């Protein structure tokens, strides 16, 4: 049967057949039952794997039909151009702003901004602060635009200023006239004759040492005069005087003619773009030669009216007072042609002509207000300096 005797005895005991040893005998019936139970099962023959059906590949090439051309889709319409982003005009306060912040606001290099400030006579590094008006001017010189905004600190209830835009009714303002010329040609004496004062006697050596600002009433109208030094050492003062004026009175001595500072003064006036009125002084002297002076002026581009040009020349004598009224009349006429206007209700803007430290008053500045009205208590900025107006005085020293 293919099994051990031990396994067979165990199977017989399970069937209840008495068999103690391998030599024991069992009946025929029990043997059949045991054989039936212990008969080994025949293992199923594994099925043969079916062979895959053979695929016959023809060696002949069958041409495929050519694909029909598919029409290309029309190109999509170009997207509409994106609107240019609105360039926000930077806004700065009317107090002051650092060079670094200004450069970032108007998107220029620090070096370019500092160079432009130097051209305007302002020396500042990137951390120093400059007045907002100076910031607006230098930004304009670099092709940028900024809006100046009056803060509550600067002026309560102030309005927005954009550039030099006037916000209310414009009114005619007094003209600002600079008196330029060569040293000792009689500029201050001419102004003394106009003002009927003796400023020249108080100057060191009779030579003007600073810019003097004076206001005179002529035929019921006010005119502001600036007396500038004629000495060669004061080139910067003459240039400053020419830049802030509306016109220039060029004083030329009839006995001395055109001199180096005369030529320089003409160049300053032309650079500032202001009209020139020539006062030929000292006509009372025997050596006076008006035709020679006019010829010299014509060679410098100032052709006198009586010679067919456009330059007004007035012969005067500051010492005798001759021709002063004619000079003032022509000054007012030129001012009327220019139609100089300002807004008295606007924030005060102007130019500092001179500044000094007075022992009794403290810091004192000579200021030309070109627009608006300056009042005691107003906040101001001058370059990197700021403060409040403590007192106001006229050109004669009277308290306002």
Image (cartoon, helix red, strand yellow):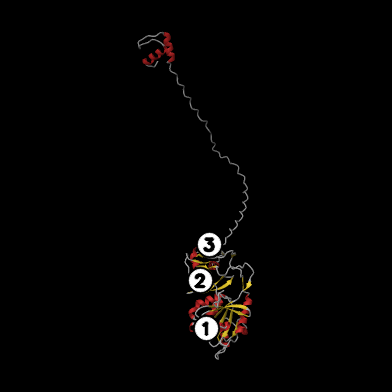
* Mark 3 burial class by Cα count in 10 Å: few <14, some 14-19, many 20+: some
Q: Which circle's residue, 1 or 2, is located before the other in the chain?
A: 2
In this rendered view, identify the residue nearer to me: 124 or 49.
124
Residue picked out by circle 2:
119
Does residue 163 appear left or right of residue 17 in this picture? right
Give coordinates of residue 302: x percent, y percent: 58, 81
Position of the N terminus, as image quadrant, is top left
Q: Are marks 1 and 2 in contact (CB under 8 Å)?
A: no
* Mark 2 burial class by Cα count in 10 Å: few <14, some 14-19, many 20+: few
Foreground: disc 1 or disc 2:
1
Calculate the distance from the C-alpha at mark 1 to the C-alpha at mark 3: 49 Å
> Which label sits on residue 200?
1
Give coordinates of residue 356: x percent, y percent: 49, 74
Foreground: disc 1 or disc 3:
1
Give coordinates of residue 261: x percent, y percent: 51, 81
Q: Which circle's residue, 1 or 3, is located before the other in the chain?
A: 3
Q: Which circle's residue, 2 or 3, is located before the other in the chain?
A: 3
Q: Are marks 1 and 3 in contact (CB under 8 Å)?
A: no
Helix, strand or loop at label 2? It is helix
Residue picked out by circle 3:
105
Calculate the distance from the C-alpha at mark 2 to the C-alpha at mark 3: 21 Å
Which residue extends farthest bottom?
Answer: 286
Give coordinates of residue 178: x percent, y percent: 56, 78
């Amino acid at each position: 049967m293919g099994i051990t005797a031990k396994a067979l005895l165990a199977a017989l005991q399970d069937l209840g057949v008495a068999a103690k040893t391998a030599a024991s005998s069992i009946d025929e019936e029990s043997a059949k039952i045991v054989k039936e139970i212990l008969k080994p099962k025949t293992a199923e023959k594994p099925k043969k794997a079916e062979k895959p059906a053979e695929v016959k590949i023809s060696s002949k090439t069958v041409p495929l039909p050519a694909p029909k051309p598919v029409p290309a889709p029309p190109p999509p319409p170009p997207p509409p151009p994106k609107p240019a982003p609105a360039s926000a005009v930077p806004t700065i306060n009317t107090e002051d702003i650092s060079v670094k912040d200004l450069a970032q606001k108007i998107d220029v290099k620090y070096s370019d901004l500092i160079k432009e400030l130097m051209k305007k006579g302002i020396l500042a590094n990137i951390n120093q602060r400059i007045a907002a008006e100076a910031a607006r001017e230098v930004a304009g010189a670099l092709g940028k635009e900024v809006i100046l905004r009056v803060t509550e600190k600067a002026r309560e209830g102030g309005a927005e200023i954009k550039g030099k835009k006037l916000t209310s009714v414009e009114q005619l303002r007094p003209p600002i006239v600079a008196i330029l010329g060569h040293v000792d040609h009689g500029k201050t004496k001419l102004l003394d004759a106009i003002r009927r004062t003796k400023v020249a006697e108080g100057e060191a050596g009779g030579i003007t040492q600073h810019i003097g600002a004076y206001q005179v009433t002529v035929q019921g109208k006010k005119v502001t005069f600036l007396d500038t030094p004629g000495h060669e050492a004061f080139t910067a003062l003459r240039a400053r005087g020419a830049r802030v004026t509306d016109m220039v009175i060029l004083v030329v001595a009839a006995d001395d003619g055109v001199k180096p500072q005369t030529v320089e003064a003409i160049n300053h006036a032309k650079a500032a773009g202001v009209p020139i009125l020539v006062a030929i002084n000292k006509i009372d002297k025997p050596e006076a030669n008006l035709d020679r002076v006019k010829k010299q002026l014509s060679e410098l581009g100032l052709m006198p009216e009586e010679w067919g040009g456009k330059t007004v020349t007035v012969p005067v004598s500051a010492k005798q007072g001759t021709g002063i009224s004619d000079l003032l009349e022509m000054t007012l006429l030129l001012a009327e042609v220019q139609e100089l206007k300002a807004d008295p209700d606007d924030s005060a803007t102007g130019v500092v002509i001179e500044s000094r430290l007075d022992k009794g008053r403290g810091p004192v500045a000579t200021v030309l207000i070109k627009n608006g009205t300056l009042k005691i208590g107003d906040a101001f900025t001058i370059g990197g300096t700021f403060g409040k107006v403590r007192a106001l005085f006229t050109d004669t020293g009277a308290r306002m």
